[in-house]
Structure formats: C-alpha cells, structure tokens
Image (cartoon, rainbow, N blue to C red):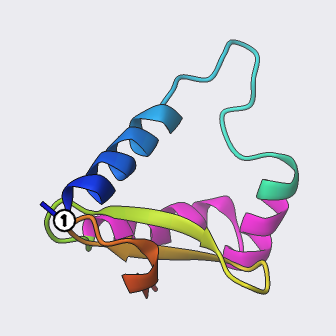
Amino acid sequence: MTSLPPRYVNHNLFWAVMCRPEAGTASGPTGDLLERINRSFGSVDKFKERFTAAALGVFGSGYAWLLEDEQRILRITGLSNQVREEGGVEAG
C-alpha cells in the first residue's frame, strides 16, 4: 500500500507531459533549458543517450528523471518501483 501514492504521482506526471507539439512549435528544448542541457551534458543528443540509458536501466515499474541539484546542474536519475527522488542514484 505504501507504494501506491508515488506510483499515482509518477504515472500522472508522465502522462501530463506526454503531448504532441502544436503545429509550428519547436520539437526540442529551447531557451534556458537548451542552454542548461548543453552545459550539463554537452548536447541534446548526449542528454538523450544518457536519459535513455537511465530509463532502460530501471528495473520494475520505475522512471528516469531529469533533476536539478543545489548548484542548478541538471542530473539524470533512474528510480525503480516508485521510489521517490531522495532514494535515487545518478545515472552515467
């Protein structure tokens, strides 16, 4: 029973951010997010590779997350079985 609330939150967040871009809009990150991805990972392609690896490395019903640390550096974390962020391990 204790894993149900995080499962609900993770599931709803996942589906809330999954949407098709509107016609005429950018299909990738732009602005500040693009700059921060490039600074943290080197490029959007390198970010995608690391994020995909983190997601594929999750066992069970977990998620890969893009997080910001205290120094505003972006990090990728893979979390298994609805574990919340504080239990994560940085991927890559």
Provide the secondary structure element on which disc 1 rests.
Answer: loop
| Position in image of residue 52 (x %, y %) | 40, 63
Q: Is residue 45 magenta?
A: yes
Seen in the image, is 20 located left or right of residue 71?
A: left
Q: Residue at x 55, y 65 (%)?
A: 66
Seen in the image, is 16 located left or right of residue 74?
A: left
Q: Which residues are magenta?
A: 34-56
Q: Which kind of residue does numbered mark 1 sit on? A: Thr
Task: Report crowding for label 1: few under 14, some 14 to 19, many 20 or more residues within 10 A (C-alpha).
Answer: few
User: Camera-side residue: 88 or 20?
Assistant: 88
Q: Is residue 4 shown to the viewer in this render?
A: yes
Q: Work out which quarter of the rendered image holds the N terminus and state it.
A: bottom left
Q: Residue at x 68, y 81 (%)?
A: 69
Q: Is residue 16 magenta?
A: no
- Disc 1 target residue: 2
Indicate whether 25 appears above or below 44: above
Q: Residue at x 48, y 33 (%)?
A: 16
| Position in image of residue 48 (x %, y %) | 52, 60
| Position in image of residue 60 (x %, y %) | 13, 65
- Secondary structure mostly seen in the magenta stretch: helix
- The residue positioned farthest toward the top in the image shown: 23
| Quadrant assignment, res 32 | bottom right
Seen in the image, is 74 located left or right of residue 56?
A: right
Indicate whether 2 appears above or below 17: below
